[in-house]
Amino acid sequence: MSNSERAMQLLEAVPDYKIEYVIAYLQGVTAGDEILEKIPNEETVEAMQELENGGGTVFEGSAHDFISAMLES
């Protein structure tokens, strides 16, 4: 039996009044991936530094305007 199958078997045995504890634990265990996705990559950090130093291009308006400008260049 795989670990996933064992976990599912145990989950089925958890009474309804305790399931919220299991859900909270699982959310905590998987939260790390979401946090890593929010850390900017090297290219983004460089672009932010360029803007802070007065360089780069700042777009104002909607995402549609941004995409249109990118396609025109």
Image (cartoon, rainbow, N blue to C red):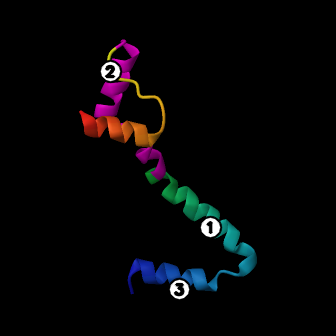
Mark found first going from the N terminus, 2 or 3: 3
55 falls in the magenta region: no
Q: Position of residue 22 (x, y in %)?
A: 63, 69
Q: Position of residue 23 (x, y in %)?
A: 62, 67
Q: Label 1, on which residue?
A: 23
Q: Say what amino acid the circle numbered 2 marks.
A: Gly
Of callouts 1 and 2, which one flags the residue occurring earlier in the amino acid sequence?
Answer: 1
Circle 2: is it few (<14), some (14-19), or many (20+) Cα within 10 Å? Answer: few
In the rendered image, which residue does mark 3 sit on?
Answer: 9
Q: CA distance from mark 2 to mark 3?
A: 55 Å
Closer to us: 70 or 54 = 70
Mark 2 and mark 3 residues within 8 Å of each other at the beta carbon = no
- Circle 2 is placed at which residue position? 56
Instruction: Between label 1 and label 2, give the one nearer the viewer.
Output: 2
**Residue drawn at x 60%, y 85% as measured from the top left:** 12
Residue 40, image quadrant: top left
Residue at 35% across / 41% down in the picture? 67
Between the C-alphas of marks 1 and 2, the distance is 44 Å
Three-letter amino acid code of the residue under disc 1: Ile
Up/down of 5 relative to 70, above or below: below
**Left/right of residue 5 with respect to residue 72 in the rendered view:** right
Q: Find the magenta span and give its range.
A: 34-54
Instruction: State the image quarter where residue 26 is shown.
Output: bottom right
Q: Amino acid at mark 3?
A: Gln
By secondary structure, the bulk of the magenta-drawn segment is best described as helix
Q: Secondary structure at mark 2?
A: loop
Q: Residue at x 33, y 26 (%)?
A: 47
